[in-house]
Every structure is written in C-alpha cells, then in structure tokens.
Amino acid sequence: MTLLPTSEIINNWCFLQEEFDPELKPFKFLWNSKWIPIANNGGGDYLCIDNNLYEAGAVGQVLYFWHDWEDRSIEKEYL
C-alpha cells in the first residue's frame, strides 16, 4: 500500500461513491461513504479510515477495502 496525496484521496473517494451507489445496488453493502481511502495498492484495493459509528468497532479504525471481495477486515482499531 502507498499513502495517497490529498487530491488522490478525494478523487478515489468520489470514484468509490459513484461505483458503489447504494441506490443503484441496494441489496449489496460494499462501500460506506464514511470510509476515507488513504492508501492503495494500484489494483483497486484501499486502506481506509472508518468514520462511521457502529455498535461493534470504533470511529477512526483502519480497514482494508478489497475491490473484489466483500470482506472488510479491520487492520487496527483505535479506542
């Protein structure tokens, strides 16, 4: 993974918002608009800061977003 400059973070976040619009694909949860992609591997996978409130987990935790796999593994959790 390579850390992204701010302009690429914004571009990638906008792309992912359009790609995984929940209104177009309401039955498949793949992307959350409160995930901020801060690094990528050049192949469509991202390391994201999670800014969403969940019952399990914590705001600010870091997760992997794999473009072709629905698993969202937590890399490190900040409490």
Image: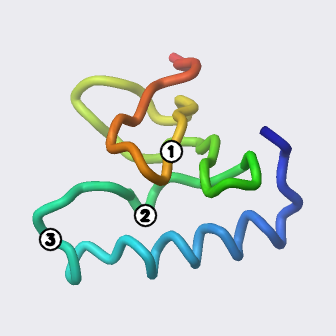
Contact, mark 2 vs mark 3 (Cβ under 8 Å): no
Q: Quadrant of residue 6?
A: bottom right
User: What residue sits right under mark 2 in the picture?
Assistant: 33
Callout 3: SS: loop
**Label 1, residues with CA under 10 Å away: few <14, some 14-19, many ≥20:** many
Viewer-proximal residue among 67 and 3: 67
Q: Is residue 8 above or below residue 79?
A: below
Residue 4 on image: x %, y %:
83, 54
Residue 26 numbered tag: 3
What number of labels is visible? 3
User: What residue sits right under mark 1 in the picture?
Assistant: 65
Q: Name the kind of residue labelled 2 in the image.
A: Ser
**Horizontal arrangement in the rendering, residue 46 relative to residue 32 (left or right):** right
Q: Residue shown at 45%/81% (left/top)?
A: 18
Q: Residue shown at 28%/36% (left/top)?
A: 54
Q: Residue shown at 58%/77% (left/top)?
A: 14
Residue 19 on image: x %, y %:
43, 76
Q: Is residue 39 visible?
A: no
Q: Is residue 73 above or below residue 29?
A: above
